[in-house]
Image: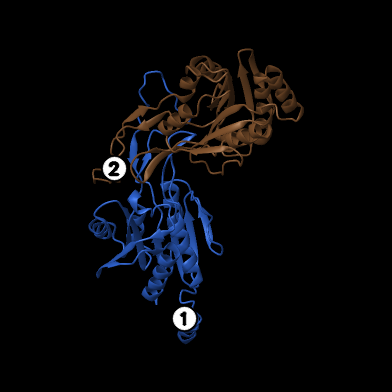
Chain colours: A blue, B brown
Amino acid sequence: EIAAAIEARLAAMAGGRPLQGRHVLVTSGPTHEPIDPVRYIANRSSGAQGTAIAAALRDLGANVTFITGPATMPPPAGVTVIAVETAAQMMTAVTAALPADAAVMAAAVADWHVANAGAQKMKKDGSGRAPALDFAENPDILATVSRAADRPRLVVGFAAETENVIDHASAKRLRKGCDWILANDVSPATGIMGGSENAVTLITADGAEDWPRMGKAEVARRLAARIAEALT
Amino acid sequence: EIAAAIEARLAAMAGGRPLQGRHVLVTSGPTHEPIDPVRYIANRSSGAQGTAIAAALRDLGANVTFITGPATMPPPAGVTVIAVETAAQMMTAVTAALPADAAVMAAAVADWHVANAGAQKMKKDGSGRAPALDFAENPDILATVSRAADRPRLVVGFAAETENVIDHASAKRLRKGCDWILANDVSPATGIMGGSENAVTLITADGAEDWPRMGKAEVARRLAARIAEALT
């Protein structure tokens, strides 16, 4: 039986499908946090990088569960899609999708939700003052998965920074307890958020590795190949 | 010369283009109000109704200036498109586009913007508390256009309500100083916001007129025909 398993893995690697039989979780896109029935807080993630990563992992043979917020691009074919809107819903979906061999948390999850979201549309009251919004912290999905009893063998987080990218991302890796962080600079001047290219730094326990600026599909293929190496 | 003008108008009406030579302004879509470089406040408007209205007015011969927030659907062909993001930008674009014979203000404009929006991405500080957002009221585009020195002859506003639709919309008509309000119920249960159908009430100085539930393109054609009647 062990021999058969080894044989299956060798066959998979030979066929360019080194992740055959592996379950990989990918989160992607923004989350939307309701203010009232018509308003919400969003972020500029298009879901492009997460979608490309899911497709690249699928191409290496992985069984991909793709948990996506309301992205502007359609999910890839050939993966299991779970669509959510809020960070809390994403947390629930991620937990329910475990166990997995690896988790790539590419979603731009809102840090906060509106604790006093209204059941009716908030209206101006003539005072010129806006209704006060009370914010509460969202569950930390990356930290939760990284410390879960059924933690995936490899947990990859993302850091979207606008300043001191490597310092912030390295600190985040330790704070969250994940294995790798793919860090990028999302300053508006870079054109990365919502754009087709990415310039990332892969941060592992061994240090920081700058990747040249390349298309998001190429970033995805490189990352998927690294994940396949790490799992085999 | 007067005879020539009359002849031109008669010819236009005969040809089904009663708005030939008229300039009509249409606003559409949501606005996005930045919180920081990556986060913003949005609303669930898809721009579907405003886009359909611009197309219907164009089909009746109008010269349409289409001022649109970041909508999920593309603008119609054959109109002058001005794309904006925030309420303040929309206000500037609308003012610059006057004079017009009519203005249809279908955009779902944010009532407030974030007065202390950050130039850098806001980060959790470990306190568990969110950074406080200070809101300031946005300019009231509908009221401003309705009271402008070069006010269009016909100003049509929209009211997206979730309760007491007709009462709220009738009060809004008087408060804003516009001529008509097209009111609809955007409660999530109706499926109207972001959907393909609409159930509206046209509120004028003469009272409230319920239209049956119909496709947004049909609402647009009815409204465009009423605008053509009012302007001729």
Q: In the depicted view, which residue is nearer to us: B88 or A138?
A: B88
Q: In the depicted view, which residue is nearer to us: B105 or B8?
A: B8
Q: Is residue A7 above or below residue A96?
A: below
Q: Is residue A208 above or below residue A106?
A: below
The residue shown at (71%, 25%) is B8
Looking at this view, name the residue that lies furthest to the right: B14
Q: Chain of mark 1?
A: A
Q: Is residue B95 above or below residue A202?
A: above
Residue A12 shows in this picture:
yes
**Which quarter of the rendering shows the C terminus of chain B?**
top right
Query: Answer yes or no: do the residues labelled 2 and 1 have beta carbons within 8 Å?
Result: no
Instruction: Name the residue that disc number 1 marks.
Output: A13
The residue shown at (66%, 35%) is B217
The residue shown at (50%, 68%) is A58
The residue shown at (49%, 65%) is A55
**Which quarter of the rendering shows the N terminus of chain B?**
top right
Q: Is residue B51 above or below residue B225?
A: below
Q: Specify few, some or many for label 2: CA neighbours under 10 Å numbering under 14, 14-19, or 20 or more.
A: few
Image location (x, y in percent) of residue B182: 59, 24
Residue A121 shows in this picture:
no
Looking at this view, name the residue that lies furthest to the bottom: A3
Q: Amino acid at mark 2?
A: Ala
Viewed as shown, does residue B59 lie left or right of A171?
right
Instruction: Name the residue that disc number 2 marks.
Output: B119
Image location (x, y in percent) of residue B174: 52, 14
Looking at this view, name the residue that lies furthest to the top: B206
Q: Amino acid at mark 1?
A: Met
Cα separation between marks 2 and 1: 47 Å
Image location (x, y in percent) of residue B153: 57, 18
Q: Specify few, some or many for label 1: CA neighbours under 10 Å numbering under 14, 14-19, or 20 or more.
A: some
Mark nearest the camera among 2 and 1 is 2
Q: Do dots 2 and 1 share one subunit?
A: no
